[in-house]
Image: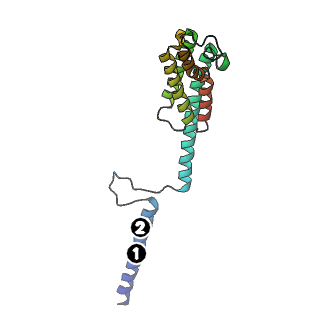
Amino acid sequence: MGGVGGRDRVKRRLMWTACTGVTAVALLTGCSDTSAGAVPHRVASPAVSAGRAAATESSRAAVAEHVKTVVEDRLSADEERFGSGTGSPCATSSPAMFTARCGAAAQATGADASFVLEQIDRREGFATLRSVARKLRTAVTGYERLGCADAPTEAAARHACLEPAALIAQGFPDLRSGANLGLRGA
């Protein structure tokens, strides 16, 4: 009888070893009792999380670089055409501030600000650029609404034109600075 009981013990031990081996393999390979189409929830390892974060940062950097490039190309052409800062026809010290020349610069600046907003729409990391572009669009709208390019004669109207004109004159460099800050996530 010792032979039959011994064989049973060996069979039980082999079955137990086989079951624990299958269980270990299932745990190591990530098998579960979820349905065939379902994906089990797994917690990413720190290395995987760091890799994803680096990929996300790399993607954001690539987007910021692309935005900077396309914005710079457009700004450079308009800035060369109209000037900026004290060289702009919209500078408050410029005799052209109340002329069609500043009106054309205002339109170009507004178009560039709108272009910038289209480029960064729903993207993270462009807070400064977004803010500058929105302020410029508001300034252009104000300049046009006040009729600043039509040489207003009333002192109050001329005075009201100063702020939007100053923002427009500085628009190209401010947009450029915002695009550069976008590279740093700001």
As helix, strand or loop, the secondary structure at mark 1 comes to: helix
Residue toward you, 59 or 6: 59
Foreground: disc 1 or disc 2:
2
Residue 170 drawn above or below residue 126: above
Q: Position of residue 81 (x, y in %)?
A: 61, 13
Would you name the residue on which mark 1 appears?
Answer: 16
| Amino acid type, callout 2 | Thr
Residue 27: mark: none
Q: Position of residue 172 (x, y in %)?
A: 60, 22
Residue 13 drawn above or below residue 109: below
**From this viewpoint, which residue is outermost toward the bottom?**
1
At 50% from the left edge and 13% from the top edge, which residue is drawn? 147
- Image quarter in which the C terminus is found: top right
Q: Position of residue 140 (x, y in %)?
A: 52, 20
Residue 35 is drawn in which quadrant? bottom left
As helix, strand or loop, the secondary structure at mark 2 comes to: helix
**From this viewpoint, which residue is outermost toward the front?**
155
| Amino acid type, callout 1 | Trp
Residue 126 seen by the camera: no
Relative to 120, 94 lies left or right: right
Residue 102 is drawn in which quadrant? top right
**Separation of residues labelled 1 and 2 (CA atoms):** 10 Å
Residue 5 seen by the camera: yes
Residue toward you, 43 or 182: 182
Would you name the residue on which mark 2 appears?
Answer: 23
